[in-house]
Image (spheres, rainbow, N blue to C red):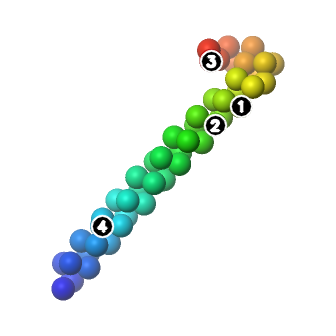
Amino acid sequence: MLSAISYQLSSISYQLSAISYQLSAISYQLSVISLCATPTLREQLSVKC
């Protein structure tokens, strides 16, 4: 019984970490897009879009 509960908890924590990883990747892409939208920042950081 306890092992089944701990297994479910570990799978839930794994799913949560995967979701947080996807969210961080999305926020990274959004920050790159916003950098490309502002030309002055793009020139300062020399970001290639």
- Relative to 28, does residue 1 appear above or below in the rendering? below
N-terminal of the pair, mark 1 or mark 3, is: 1
Please state which amino acid type lies under the numbered disc 2.
Leu
> Which quadrant is the C terminus positioned in?
top right
Mark 1, Cα crowd under 10 Å, few <14 / some 14-19 / many 20+, is few
**In the image, residue 10 lies at what x, y percent?**
30, 67
Q: Which residue is mark 1?
A: 34
Please state which amino acid type lies under the numbered disc 3.
Cys
Give the CA distance from mark 4 to mark 2.
30 Å
Q: Secondary structure at mark 2?
A: helix
N-terminal of the pair, mark 2 or mark 3, is: 2
Q: Which residue is mark 3?
A: 49
Q: Name the one closer to the observer, 47 or 29.
A: 29
Q: Given this view, does label 4 or label 3 mark the residue nearer the observer?
A: 3
* Residue at x 37% of width, y 64% of height: 13
Give the CA distance from mark 1 to mark 4.
36 Å
Q: Which residue is mark 2?
A: 30
- Left or right: 1, with 22 as reference point: left
Q: Which residue is mark 4?
A: 10
Q: Secondary structure at mark 4?
A: helix
Residue 18: which disc? none
Please state which amino acid type lies under the numbered disc 1.
Ser
- Left or right: 13, with 43 as reference point: left
* Residue at x 63% of width, y 29% of height: 32
N-terminal of the pair, mark 1 or mark 4, is: 4
Q: Secondary structure at mark 3?
A: loop
Does the residue at mark 2 contact the one at mark 1 (Cβ under 8 Å)? yes
N-terminal of the pair, mark 4 or mark 3, is: 4
